[in-house]
Image (tube, helix red, strand yellow):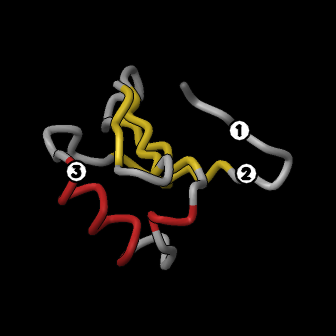
Amino acid sequence: MLALGGATRVYLAVGGTDLRKGFDGLYGVVRSKLASDPATGHLFVFCNGSRNRIKVLHFDGSGLWICA
């Protein structure tokens, strides 16, 4: 279950992202382009080049999950 608190932030990666990336690839994008730590519990949203699909990366305390 996804539990979001009042302190949860939503980060949107600007520009198109290659959505073929999995956990490791999106984790790297968060670290390098967004300069943030994916293990904070915030939501990181990525969209493809044509802006018709998204992926959300989230750490729930026990592991990462991706919602597409």
Q: Are marks 3 and 1 in contact (CB under 8 Å)?
A: no
The quarter holding residue 22 reads top left
Badge number at residue 4: 1
Q: Secondary structure at mark 2?
A: loop
**Label 3 amino acid?**
Phe
Q: Position of residue 26 (x, y in %)?
A: 28, 55
**Label 1 amino acid?**
Leu
Question: How dense is the environment of label 1, judged by Cα within 10 Å: few (below 14), some, or many (20 and up)?
Answer: few
Q: CA distance from mark 3 to mark 1?
A: 20 Å
Residue labelled with disc 3: 23
Residue 27 vs residue 20, the one in the foreground: 27
Residue 12 vs residue 2, the one in the foreground: 2
Tell me: 14 left or right of 29. right
Q: Secondary structure at mark 1?
A: loop
What residue appears at the point 30 percent right and 48 percent down from the top-left corner? 17
Q: Are marks 2 and 3 in contact (CB under 8 Å)?
A: no
Q: Position of residue 50 (x, y in %)?
A: 33, 29
**Label 2 amino acid?**
Thr
Tell me: 21 left or right of 4. left
Q: Are marks 1 and 2 in contact (CB under 8 Å)?
A: yes
Residue labelled with disc 2: 8
Q: Is residue 51 above or below residue 63?
A: above
Quarter of the picture containing the C terminus is top left
First in sequence: mark 2 vs mark 3: 2
Tell me: 35 left or right of 8. left
First in sequence: mark 3 vs mark 1: 1
What residue appears at the point 44 percent right and 38 percent down from the top-left corner? 56
